[in-house]
Amino acid sequence: MPINLSGRPFLRLLDFSTEEIEYLLKLSKNFKDLKRTGTPHRYLEGKNIVLLFQKTSTRTRCAFEVGAMDLGMGVTYLDPGSSQMGKKESIEDTARVLGRFYDGIEFRGFAQTDVEDLAENAGVPVWNGLTTEWHPTQMLADILTVQENFNYDIKGKTLVFMGDAANNVARSLMVVCSKLGMNFVACGPKENMPDAELVKTCEAIAAENGCTVKCTDDVKDACTGADVIYTDVWVSMGEPDEVWQQRIEQLQPYRVTKEIMAMAKPTAIFLHCLPAFHDTNTTTGADIAKRFGVTEMEVEDDVFESKQSKVFDEAENRMHTIKAVMYATLQ
């Protein structure tokens, strides 16, 4: 049966079947091939989209803007100070206005209920560029990167997430791995695990697809024989500054080091959704080093800069997979 996602919102991968996710990944590869060969693909000429950002981002904004322009669309970017959404105008009313101007709406912000309210009221496809709960467009970029490094044969491969496994990236990885037949391991402190109900849901999905879900605080148990080691920042945008000390104390044992990569398979790759605090060449990195004496946080610089690190392929793939989502839902 042909896959048809036209008019669908893209809010979380739990809403999509294995076949639909695989279709988006194949479409992403096709768009990447077209981009690399310089082949024009302005398939959505004349359409317009708007990007609503409560949280700023380099990759998300650029991926949506370049992807949309490659497809022939016009783009409007609204940063946190350029919209009255949630202040002088409700999310519902904003959605009903923008849905009359634009063919699609991207939202990057905090509450998942906000992007769901937009989708319910806009009358056009709405895409989740990140919320506190989910990060679905990042997942497609991550999996495309894994596919590229394992000859597009990812079933039975094991992906380990190291660190704060309760965050949106770890939760989303658990879903997409379960849907696509990859074993998922959350490795971090017991108090930083995905909620039990979601784990139970993903375990059931994984069982249908011949893979497993595991949560552990044992680094050796988690990483031995892994195919992919993945980590993320220890404190997410919007969290209070006071949590840095607690997270550093909690998560230092789960920093991705050369020793951890050596536990994985020789062919293993390292992934990170970026930005990464692997040195002190940022104001935040320098500040943390000054306050806590930590010069590398979630990943060692030697790992980040190693041949096993595919983080910049992953960042590029964000554009190709976002392009696939926009095309599939707007065509």
Image (spheres, rainbow, N blue to C red):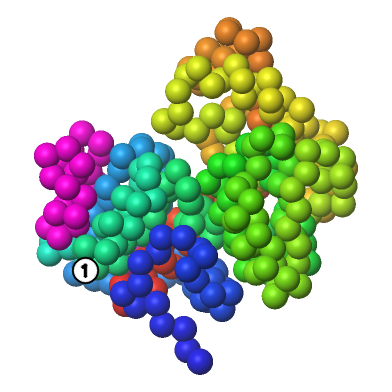
Looking at the picture, does residue 57 appear above or below residue 292?
A: below
Q: Residue furthest bottom?
A: 1
Task: Say which quadrant the C terminus sits in.
Answer: bottom left
* Residue 110, x across and y down, in percent: 38, 42
Q: Residue furthest top?
A: 290
Q: Residue furthest front?
A: 197
Hey, what amino acid is under mark 1? Answer: Gly
* Residue 81, x across and y down, in percent: 20, 34
Q: Residue at x 36, y 37 (%)?
A: 56
Label 1 residue SS = loop
Judge the density around disc 1: few (<14), some (14-19), many (≥20) Cα neighbours within 10 Å: some
Q: Nearer the viewer, residue 92 or 295?
A: 92
Q: Which residues are magenta?
A: 69-98
Q: Is 94 within the magenta? A: yes
Name the quadrant containing residue 118.
bottom left
Question: In the rendered image, is residue 170 in sight?
Answer: no
Q: List the residue tagged with mark 1.
A: 123
Q: Residue at x 39, y 74 (%)?
A: 328
* Residue 45, x across and y down, in percent: 24, 71
Q: Residue at x 78, y 38 (%)?
A: 217
Name the quadrant containing residue 303.
top right
Looking at the picture, does residue 99 appear above or below residue 316?
A: below
Q: Residue at x 62, y 24 (%)?
A: 247
Question: In the rendered image, is residue 293 in sight?
Answer: yes
Q: Is residue 97 left or right of residue 110?
A: left
* Residue 22, x across and y down, in percent: 57, 73
Q: Is residue 183 left or right of residue 51?
A: right
